Image (cartoon, helix red, strand yellow):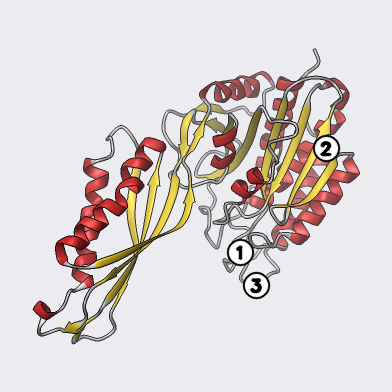
Amino acid sequence: MFSDKQIGAATALRHKLHQHPELKFQENGTAALVAEQLRALGYRVTEGIATTGVMAELDTGREGPVIAFRADMDALPIKEANTFAHRSQQEGLMHACGHDGHTATLLLAAEAIMALRDELCGHIKLLFQPGEEGGNGADIMVKEGVLDNPKVDAIFGYHNRPGFPVGQLFVKPGPAMGGNDTYKVTITGVSGHAAMPHLAVDPIYVGASLVQQLQGLVGRHKSPLEAGVITVAAFHAGDAANVIPGQAELLVNIRSDRPSSRKALAGKLEQVTAGVCAAHGAQFHLEHLHQVPPLVNDPEWSERLLAIASEHQVSTDIQRLDYMPTMGAEDFAFYLQEVPGCFFFVGNGDSAYLHNEHYDFNDAVLPVAGGMFVALAKGLLSRA
């Protein structure tokens, strides 16, 4: 599907992006490079979406479906420990999740798709998104209209997956990645002397009780046939051995696989917190810091993607999973809340895991994932 020259150029570009990582909503250099290449290919390009996002459009001039492909561009605040030649040149910043590879993949596909334009009908949108890493950039892209004018019929994206065979393409129809709700719980009690706890309201004791009660939501309020987990990731209170502090802060992270499990967990957090605090005479404040909905692939579009992958021999190893490959969150879920589609995965091999200082995107993924995007364009927009 791609020539050795095209794959070589995409690999070189991926290495260049890896050397110059940029944090969420600061992807100025990356966005400029992306826009330049897309214009050179002949796409109509819109910049500055969601701050640094780029949208490229190919209107074939012939009536047909409107499909969208998405890649994310941002890096992470991680100091890279790799020593290869294309390691990060930005101290303390790193492409530790493979977004450099995702961006290079879609640019590789963009070239092949443009070469096919006379064989296609309909309209294609290529979305290069900022702020996936905790910025909910997809939500902003949606709110700024990338799925409208013309209205997108289906959207597709992917993520590389360490721990799966290199180049293995797989899809989980239905719930495929976890929703992420993060809360800060501030418990206010009454400070006092450690020797006279009856004169105080101890927020540490109240907080510890809350930690225990939250696990009951997972065990007794969520269906055992659904996935979800609650993690109290931080607990801060006090700084002296003989003082009961007046306040405690907890960071609570909730993962869920679908709206019903999210309702059973995140939906009951305030109720449980209020009950625990009331029982001990404490007050509380709940702040919702971050929210990404569960990523749920449309079953019909998932099956169509798998069929197209097989028809066009995108990979020699194509799998349909019957389990969630991860509870990690992915803001592609915001697109799938608006239009149907599918988020697929490609194995990255036996690499370090995502968000690790030794991670690197496997360049062998480029022709497989890029080939999937091209195959979707052929399979869904062919004039034949």
Q: Position of residue 138 (x, y in %)?
A: 61, 46
Q: Residues within 10 Å of mark 3 (few under 14, many from 20)?
A: few
Q: Is residue 348 visible?
A: no
**Residue carrying label 3:** 91
Q: Which residue is more in the foreground, 237 or 185?
A: 185
Report the residue at 71% width, 59% height from top: 27
Q: Position of residue 302 (x, y in %)?
A: 56, 25
Residue 111: image tag: 2
200 left or right of 175 in image: left
**Residue carrying label 1:** 82
Residue 136: image tag: none
Q: Is residue 280 above or below residue 167?
A: below
In the rendered image, which quarter contains the C terminus? top right
Depth check, mark 3 against mark 1: the one in front is 3
Quadrant location of residue 334? top right
N-terminal-most mark, 3 or 2: 3
Instruction: Give the CA separation, mark 3 to mark 1.
Output: 12 Å
N-terminal-most mark, 3 or 1: 1
Which SS class for mark 3?
loop
Quadrant location of residue 212? bottom left
Which SS class for mark 2?
helix
N-terminal-most mark, 1 or 2: 1
Query: What amino acid type should be assigned to the residue bearing mark 1?
Result: Asn
Query: What amino acid type should be assigned to the residue bearing mark 3?
Result: Glu
Report the residue at 61% width, 25% height from top: 305
In the rendered image, which quarter contains the N terminus? top right
Q: Position of residue 223 (x, y in %)?
A: 28, 35
Cβ atoms under marks 3 and 2 closer than 8 Å = no
Query: What amino acid type should be assigned to the residue bearing mark 2?
Result: Glu
